Image (cartoon, rainbow, N blue to C red):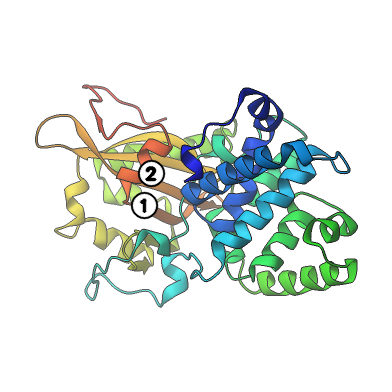
Amino acid sequence: MSTLTVLPEDAVAAFEPFRRELTGYCYRMLGSGADADDAVQETLVRAWRAYDRFEGRASVRTWLYRIATNVCLDQVRGRKRRARPMDLGPSTTVAAAELIERDAATWVEPVPDGAVLPTAGDPAELAVARETVRLAFVAALQHLPPRQRAVLLLREVLQWHADEVAQLLDTTVASVNSALQRARATLANRTPAETDPLRPDDPAQRELLARYVDAFERYDMDALAALLREDAIQNMPPYDLWLQGRDQLVAWMVSPGPDECRGSRLLAVEANGMPAFAQYRPDPGGGHRAWALQVLEIVDGRILAFNSFLDVERLFPRFGLPLLRNFGAVHRGL
């Protein structure tokens, strides 16, 4: 596999500056951090093998995006699109809830900000970058045919000109413009309202998140309910169950199974440009064991969605998080 290939030093020097932005592009295309990593590695291996034939008629960056696009198109060929639980069926109630697990490849997965987002640059461009890795946006992208997906990302997110995209995809400008128009129409019907991105310097958001950590760690349902919108949503991949409504979410959290989360500790992380927390539950052997990666969606100072990803064996290492942690007697999640 390409992930086992070690690139020579000269190739690393030429390609490494583009790894993060290529990972962001491939993540948007594929909806999975692991798949994006594989796609980028395959891109760099293909580029290295062809490097002696690179004639410089395009920039290295453009050349790498051409290869990455072809790799992604190869990866998604014949696959089912990744989704969120809300895409697969109606919400349920606590009384009727069934935990039906689906394969990991079913789901749009969270990704660390540090793997896909630039750390500096024009504030407006950074805002677009954060907006276009939101879980809801990435999930909406999966509804597009792969080539439309590539066109929309290259034109709207990366701000390439139509003739540049046409050259990359070996097609015409008219075809690019037509694909972009169709992609915009599809997304207009599928992309949810904008949510608030992570704003570490925003006192109001910091206060909201501090109240959330305090309420969750004390498992104070009244305090937690006060932070939720009335139409709040909860979902828990790899299970296809999802709930909607403040009362349903609170009822789920105090039902016999989920109530095992009492005594959890939260550790702040950054995922998909949104506030997120690593949740650790008390471990019978001592300390706390990884249980879920929570990604919050916030609108107007209230929590709209509570996305709890339970595949910690895969996700926590990607975020640089241990599976077992001792928080000690005093802990603050933020």
Q: Position of residue 213 (x, y in %)?
A: 36, 38
Seen from the viewer's position, the closer of residues 94 and 219 is 94
- Which residue sits furthest front? 52
Mark 2 or mark 1, whichever is nearer to me: 2
Does the residue at mark 2 contact the one at mark 1 (Cβ under 8 Å)?
yes
Amino acid type, callout 2: Leu
Amino acid type, callout 1: Phe
Q: Is residue 115 left or right of residue 101?
A: right
Residue 273 shows in the view: no
Q: Position of residue 170 (x, y in %)?
A: 81, 62
Q: Residue at x 40, y 40 (%)?
A: 277
In the rendering, which numbered label is found on residue 315?
Answer: 2
Please say if 116 is above or below 73: above
Q: Mark 2: which secondary structure?
A: helix
Residue 52 shows in the view: yes
Please say if 168 is above or below 145: above
Q: Residue at x 24, y 67 (%)?
A: 99
Earlier-in-chain disc, 2 versus 1:
1
For disc 2, the neighbor class at 10 Å (few under 14, some 14 to 19, many from 20) is: many
Reading the image, the residue beneath label 1 is: 309
Residue 120 sits in quarter: top right
Seen from the viewer's position, the closer of residues 292 and 81 is 81
Residue 241 sits in quarter: bottom left
Q: Residue at x 68, y 35 (%)?
A: 18
